[in-house]
Structures are given as C-alpha cells and as structure tokens.
Amino acid sequence: MAEKTGIEWADSTWNPVVGCTRVNKGCEHCYAERLSGRLSGMGLSKYAGLTRADSGRWTGDVRLDERTLTGQLGRWKSGRRVFVCSMSDLFHEKVHKSWRVRVFEEMSRHRQHRYILLTKRFQRMAEFIYDVPYMEVFEEVWWGMTAFDQASYNTALGWLHQMPCNFRKWLSLEPLLGPIYARNNYLNVVRGVVVGGETGPGARRMHVEWVDQVYDQCAEAGVQFFFKRWSDGGVPAGESRCTYRGVLHQELF
C-alpha cells in the first residue's frame, strides 16, 4: 500500500487485490503491468508471478492479499482519497464476489476516507451494486469507468446511466486514443471526466482537438473537467506535461 501516489486525483493507493489481464487496446501500455513487473523484480513477493519474464505481459493470475486487505486502511486516521486496486481491476472476472464484498466491508470500517474505483469491465461493476446487500459505504465511493474511444465511451456511459442516480460516478478517458462525441445527453450522468494521454515506451499521441471536444462537451453538460497529462508521445507547443490551454485543471474528487 502506498503512503503517497503520483496519481494526480488520489492521495494514496490501496491494493487488496493484485493482478489483471488486458481487455482492449487501451491496455496496450498498461502502467500497472509495467510496475508489477518492476516490483516483482525488486523482491516484493506480493507481485511475484503476475507478469511474464519474457514479455512483461500479465500472466492472468489474480490474487487477494489478506495482509493489505485487513491491515492497512486503519493506519490513516485522517481522511484521504484512496484509489482502490490501482494494480488490478476489482471487477475482473477472476475476482470472487466474496473478495469484493470483503473489500467493501473493510472500507465501511474506515469511513473517514473517500474511495475511488475504476474499471474497464463496465457490466460487472454495474451488476455488483444490485447483487449484494446495500452498504452505507457506497456513499463514500466514486464509481469510475475507463473509455478510450467512441465505442468504449458509448458503452461506459450506457452502464453508468443505469446505476443509481445518487451515486458519485465519473469517467476516465485515459489513454484518450481518438475523438469522442457525447450522445443522448448521457455525459451529465457523471460528476467529472478525467482526460489523460498514454505513458511509457511507444506511447500513442493524444491530439489537441480530441481534448478540445471533451472539454467543450463537459462545459456544455456542466460536468467537471480534470486534465491529468499529455501523452509521452508528444506535448503540444506552449503546454507543460500537465496543463491544458496553459492551465491546470485538477479539481474533482
């Protein structure tokens, strides 16, 4: 568990579940995959065997870490923005329902924090809410889905629209790999949109006009716009790595 994180929209990360598999082309330069391999190479047994030595790709092993699950959140007495499962996907097919329930039960014991979830497995997140007894901790959770192009955006917004309207919902467009246009006025079902470019070797470029379209649509829908960073594939002239139109846009959670 990280005391601090470089993720701009979180204060800390909490990883009671680790390991994943790629689900679409947005995963091609997955930072969690790269980081898991490095942590394993540093001797951290929690991450051993999660990625292949030859390719660096996920092996498909997904596991629950009991020590992190039950022994970490209580260490932080003051409230933090906690990114849950930054090194996995809590709604991965191999994550047992009982694991998810235990994660939420642990969060409910530490209500001083704000918990931020993010998944590419949209349907499994949406269905989980109706598949377990209602938990009050839901009020402290931000439910996020990741999209990277028009098709994944349409699907994510459709599922977010079906989730309870009083839930705090958000959308991550990272990496943004193409133009996205809001349809059916669905964008206003989320409280905020995070936009970011791809990182790592071979990162694909994020074009300014793609960001412009998202920014304008957020403004029209009254949705908070959070700009994380430009792609390692290129930073536009006049911008720093984390500025858009010369300004930091980093208020959301």
Image: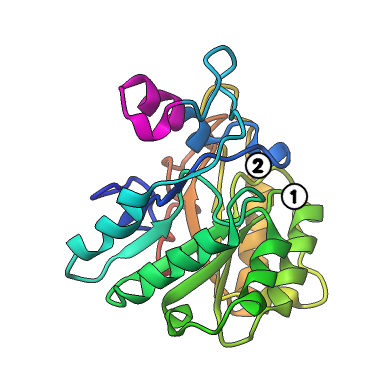
Instruction: Give the amino acid type for the residue marked by disc 1 in the picture.
Output: Asp
Residue beneath disc 2: 207
245 or 197, which lies in front?
197
Label located before the other in sequence (1 or 2): 1
Q: In whole angstroms, how far apart are the C-alphas of marks 1 and 2? A: 13 Å
**Disc count in the image?**
2
Residue range corresponding to the magenta coloring: 35-48
**In the image, residue 21 above or below residue 148:** above
Quarter-of-image position of residue 217: bottom right
Q: Main secondary structure of the magenta part?
A: helix
Q: Residue at x 26, y 49 (%)?
A: 4
Q: Is residue 176 left or right of residue 199?
A: right
Q: Residue at x 27, y 76 (%)?
A: 112
Q: Nearer the viewer, mark 1 or mark 2?
A: 1
Instruction: Give the amino acid type for the residue marked by disc 2 in the picture.
Output: His
22 or 215, which lies in front?
22
Quadrant where the C terminus is found in the figure: bottom left
Q: Residues within 10 Å of mark 2 (few under 14, many from 20)?
A: some
* x and y, in percent, of residue 94 in the image: 63, 48
Q: Residues within 10 Å of mark 1 (few under 14, many from 20)?
A: some
Q: Is residue 105 left or right of residue 91?
A: left
Inspect the magenta stretch and tell me whether residue 37 lies in it.
Answer: yes
Q: Residue at x 42, y 27 (%)?
A: 48
Residue beneath disc 1: 149
Q: Residue at x 54, y 37 (%)?
A: 231
